[in-house]
Every structure is written in C-alpha cells, then in structure tokens.
C-alpha cells in the first residue's frame, strides 16, 4: 500500500467509481446473488437497461434504470451508486426500487 493512500472503503460511496459491467453490478448490489446467474439472465434477454435488452458486458452508470424479469414478475431499480465492493448493509444503498 502506498503511504498516504486512502483505502477504497474509506472514500465516499459516490466517488468510488463511475461505471461498471452490468453482471458485476447486479452481483455487488445483490440484485442477483451470483455473477454467473447474472450473466445467464443477460444472455437470455431477461435484463434491460434503460428499456433496451442488455448484454452482461454493458457498462452501468448512476441514473440507469435496470429491469430484470424473474418468471412472471419483474423488478425495476434505479442505479444510485456504482462501487467495486459493498458490504451487505451498503448494498441496499446502491439502488432504489421503482
């Protein structure tokens, strides 16, 4: 570690990262439990970002609307924070259900 460097967890949530891969965001935010499941959902066309079918590699940024189809119901969420890692308590603050 570089002397004087601030560890990632000590920086404010809003300044940690600008964008992230969709599959990783779904896993880190705990919208989907595993990254492989998030990848499969994207490949099957069940995940949309801003009303467009999204690939797992698509970048997600603050303000994007994610819609995930789970069987006969769907979940819509707005991205509030993008960060590499999060604790269980912080994950709820990364998005807002719509």
Image (cartoon, grey):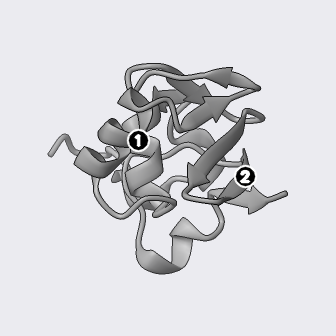
- Residue 3 rendering spot, x and y as whole percentages: 22, 45
SS type, badge 1 = helix
Q: For the view shown, which residue lies furthest in the front direction?
A: 72
- Count the labels in the image: 2
* Image height of 93 relative to 20, above or below: below
* Image height of 71 relative to 4, above or below: below
Compared across the picture, whether 65 is left or right of 35 comes to right
Compared across the picture, whether 78 is left or right of 16 comes to right
Quarter holding residue 95: bottom right
Q: For the view shown, which residue lies furthest in the right direction?
A: 98
SS type, badge 2 = strand
24 vs 6, nearest the viewer: 24
Which residue: 48% across, 19% down?
58
Q: CA distance from mark 1 to mark 2?
A: 16 Å
Give the residue at mark 2: 77
Which callout, 1 or 2, points at the residue further toward the start of the chain? 1
- Residue 85 rendering spot, x and y as whole percentages: 37, 55
In the rendered image, the quadrant that contains the C terminus is bottom right
25 vs 41, nearest the viewer: 41
Which residue: 64% across, 60% down?
72
* Image height of 71 relative to 15, above or below: below
**Residue 53's mark?**
none
Q: Crowding at label 1, few (<14), some or many (≥20) Cα neighbours within 10 Å?
A: many
Q: For the view shown, which residue lies furthest in the left direction?
A: 1
- Residue 64 rendering spot, x and y as whole percentages: 73, 33
- Residue 29 rendering spot, x and y as whole percentages: 49, 58
Give the residue at mark 1: 41
């Amino acid at each position: 570690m570089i002397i004087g460097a601030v560890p990632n967890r000590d920086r404010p949530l809003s300044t940690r990262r600008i964008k992230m891969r969709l599959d990783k965001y779904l896993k880190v935010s705990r919208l989907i439990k595993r990254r492989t499941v998030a990848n499969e959902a994207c490949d099957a066309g069940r995940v949309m970002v801003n009303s467009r079918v999204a690939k797992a590699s698509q970048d997600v940024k603050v303000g994007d609307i994610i819609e995930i189809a789970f069987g006969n119901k769907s979940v819509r969420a707005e991205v509030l924070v993008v960060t590499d890692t999060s604790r269980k308590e912080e994950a709820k603050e990364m998005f807002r259900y719509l």
